[in-house]
Amino acid sequence: MGNILCPHCNTATSLNPVLIQDGHAFMPDRSSEREKVYEKAVIFGIKEAKYPYKVSYGIFECQACSERFLAKKEEYTDWVVAYPLPRKPVDEEIPEPIKSQFEEARLCFVVDAYLGCLLVCRTALIAVQRNTGVTSLQELKGKGLISNILYKQADEVRLWANIVSHEDIPDKVVKDDCEQLLAYMEALLYAIYVEPKRLADLSQKRKQLKDE
């Protein structure tokens, strides 16, 4: 049945169905012994169902952490997690309130609130400027905190957020656009806060090893 990213441990795991549902009834996974567990509970509904079954929801168990989650599958699409909402952890090196704002932007993306995602990203951009003591993204580049390509990416996030906050274009912002802009925002935060801290820690560890 393919792989999916577990919302509990964030590990790519093969789909291990515990229970699936079609348009008529909950049905046990018929490719394993698990069907015996649920057979009696659902047998009446299965009798009333007609083939072919159109699967829409399923309960799956992660092969890595053994936690269970709900996934959905529409016709001609892959399985995607429906509950709990998959949330990629934000790097601890990112300071507050920027960290919380970026977490909120990611949550907006997960629930398909793409306009909200971009607007929260703009709020995070303003917080980054305040945190670094600059008044513009151009100043961030001038101080050497970000490269020219990161400046262009961050400015694209800013420009998109400005458009959606002033223009009535809800149908124009699609998932792929928002996902790309969110990736630009993540790259900016990584360059300013995460990479310098990790590089400093690695350098310090090397010096300690050399002194021993």
Image (spheres, grey):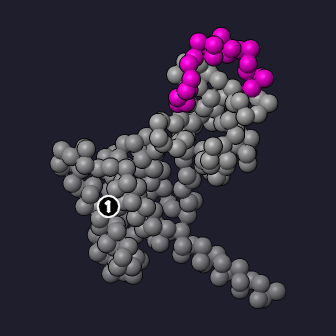
Q: Residue at x 63, y 16 (%)?
A: 46
Q: Residue at x 74, y 41 (%)?
A: 66
Q: Nearer the viewer, residue 192 or 155?
A: 155
* Number of other residues with Cα within 10 Å of mark 1, as a class: few under 14, some 14 to 19, many 20 or more: many
Residue 31 percent across, percent down from the top left: 73, 34
Residue 172 percent across, percent down from the top left: 25, 49
Task: Judge from the rendering whether residue 162 lies leftward or rightward of residue 47; answer left or right.
Answer: left
Task: Judge from the rendering whether residue 165 lies leftward or rightward of residue 154; answer left or right.
Answer: left
On whether residue 26 falls in the magenta region, the answer is no
Q: Residue at x 57, y 59 (%)?
A: 92
Where residue 41 sits, quadrant-wise, is top right
Which residue was labeled with disc 1? Answer: 157
Q: Residue furthest right?
A: 212
Q: Nearer the viewer, residue 203 or 190?
A: 190
Question: The C terminus appears in which quarter of the rendering?
Answer: bottom right
Circle 1 — which element? helix
Question: The N terminus appears in which quarter of the rendering?
Answer: top right
Q: Is residue 186 above or below residue 140?
A: above
Q: Is residue 163 above or below residue 80?
A: below
Q: Residue at x 51, y 62 (%)?
A: 94
Residue range (magenta): 35-56
Q: Nearer the viewer, residue 127 or 150?
A: 150
Task: Judge from the rendering whether residue 64 lies leftward or rightward of residue 50; answer left or right.
Answer: right
On whether residue 44 falls in the magenta region, the answer is yes
Q: Is residue 159 above or below residue 136?
A: above
Where residue 7 sits, quadrant-wise, is top right
Task: Judge from the rendering whether residue 142 lies leftward or rightward of residue 14; answer left or right.
Answer: left
What secondary structure predominates along the stretch shown in magenta?
helix
Residue 175 percent across, percent down from the top left: 37, 50
Residue type (three-letter) at the residue carrying disc 1: Val
